[in-house]
Amino acid sequence: MGDEKDKEQLKKEAAEKAKAIAKKRLEEKRAAEQAELKEASDPEEDLAKKKAAAAAKAKAAALAKKKAREQEAQLDSSTPEEPEEEDLAKKKAAAAAKAKAAALAKKKAREQEAQTEAPAPDEPEDDLAKKKAAAAAKAKAAALAKMKAKEQAAKAEGSPAEAAEEEGEILAKKKAAAAAKAKAAALAKMKAKEQESGGEAAGNEELAKKKAAAAAKAKAAAAAKAKAAAMAKQAGESGGDDEKAKAIAAAKAKAAAAAKAKAAAAAKASGAGGDDEKAKAIAAAKAKAAAAAKARAAGGTKAAAEPEAEQPPSANQPFLDLYTKVIEEHLGGDVLEESYINRLSKDVPTLVARQDTYFRIAEFLRYNEQLGFDYLSELHGTDFETHMEVYVHLYSYKNRQTVALKTKIDRSDPVIESLASLWAGANWPECEAYDLLGISFKGHPGLYRIMLGEEWIGHPLRKDYEPYDVEV
């Protein structure tokens, strides 16, 4: 009886030790899984440290398993039979651990494939290739470390190591395939970009040719337009002078006829010879005046008929052609009302914008790389009684060129967009135009009467301005 009790006690102790060993193995596997997850979440951790930690864990697991096996062997020598429930629990725990390891390996492989197949579009090609190579190297190293750990675990357990090896081989194959796919995708992307750059170069050459042809056409059209305008101006001036001379001559003839009629009536009424002589003298004087006026009119029409000498084209005409061409290409042909060379202001190229396109054109002149007018030297307003105008003078330090931009606005409601957001130098001049002309600038950061003060009545530079206090 005592021997049977000792055997049962030994069996119980063996079962408890086996359970403790199984629990310890489970904890070690869970720790290994957590370490693997940590490695996957922190890709920038040193690979050498990971390998060393994995090797240390594997050695510790192997030693623990070896000790457990020695203890089991000692127990087996004393207790030849082990409970079936204990073996079943071990198998279940081992199967669960393998399933978890396989699931984690699949998850890692998928994440690596997703990272390699979907690179960030904004990264440069060299950085992308380096990152892909590093990711592939890390994946290979992780696969090798995993395979070594599994081999060591299989050796320590002496359990179904073949299944673990097969799983490791499958995982390594998947990772290698993923790395190959990533490399192929990177190469394909590089080739596509090279082809695109080649196509763009060819397209740029064609575009340059088209632009040159368009520039030549625009110059020819501008020259033809200038000639037509000059001819029309000459014709209009000569025609206008002829009409004026005719009107003057007709008015004088009417005046002479009226004077003759009056003189005849006066002669009839008086019936005296002295009056007849006076009337004749008056008629002769009027005839002489009419003849002189006719001669003057004939001389004026003759002078107007002579053609004016053509002015040579301005040196700034090519710049004006370039500005109008670039603006029409990017913003459309209807954004400008007119463009001309201002002969009265040092031949500055001048662009006349519509009121609704004034800010768009100013913004384009400011930020377009080809034009780059980065300095506003002048901004003022003018009252023309029928309308008002805002005039802006710009300068490009990069190109050392000037341009003037102006627009017409309604005099009864003088409102236009502010340019202070484009050029800080527009702030005070716009306040001055608001103070002296009453032009309101939408979007100005702080519009106020900069000279006269808010209590001043009226705007002195308007043509219809009347002082509120005449003595001031």
Image (spheres, grey):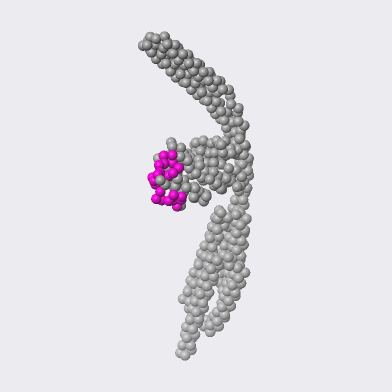
Q: Residue furthest bottom?
A: 2
Q: Is residue 74 above or below residue 127?
A: below
Name which residue lies at 55% across and 79% down.
Answer: 68
Q: Quadrant of residue 255?
A: top left
In x, y percent, where is residue 184? 61, 53
Position in image of residue 273 (x %, y %):
41, 9
Q: Is residue 293 above or below residue 115?
A: above
Q: Is 213 or 91 nearer to us in this picture?
A: 213
Residue in the foreground of this view, choosing between 190 and 278 = 278
Which residue lies at the image location 61% right of the left edge and 45% below the top edge? 400
Placement of 140 over or under 80, stated as above or below: above
Q: Does 460 appear above or below 222?
A: below
Count every numbered label the image shows and give the total.
Answer: 0
Query: Is residue 36 covered in magenta?
Result: no
Q: Depth check: give the residue in front, 275 or 26.
A: 275
Residue at the limit of the structure toward the left, as seen here: 269
Residue at position x 50%, y 66% from top? 99
Q: Position of residue 214 (x, y in %)?
A: 59, 35
Task: Answer whether residue 362 is visible to the viewer in this image.
Answer: no
Name the side, left or right, on which 304 lies relative to 472. right
Q: Nearer the viewer, residue 451 or 106?
A: 451
Could one spot residue 233 in this view of the protein? yes
* Quadrant in the rendering for residue 55: bottom right
Q: Is residue 157 left or right of residue 465?
A: right
Q: Is residue 450 magenta?
A: yes
Q: Main secondary structure of the magenta part?
A: loop
Q: Which stretch did the figure color magenta?
A: 446-470
Q: Residue at x 49, y 21 (%)?
A: 245
Q: Position of residue 466 (x, y in %)?
A: 40, 42
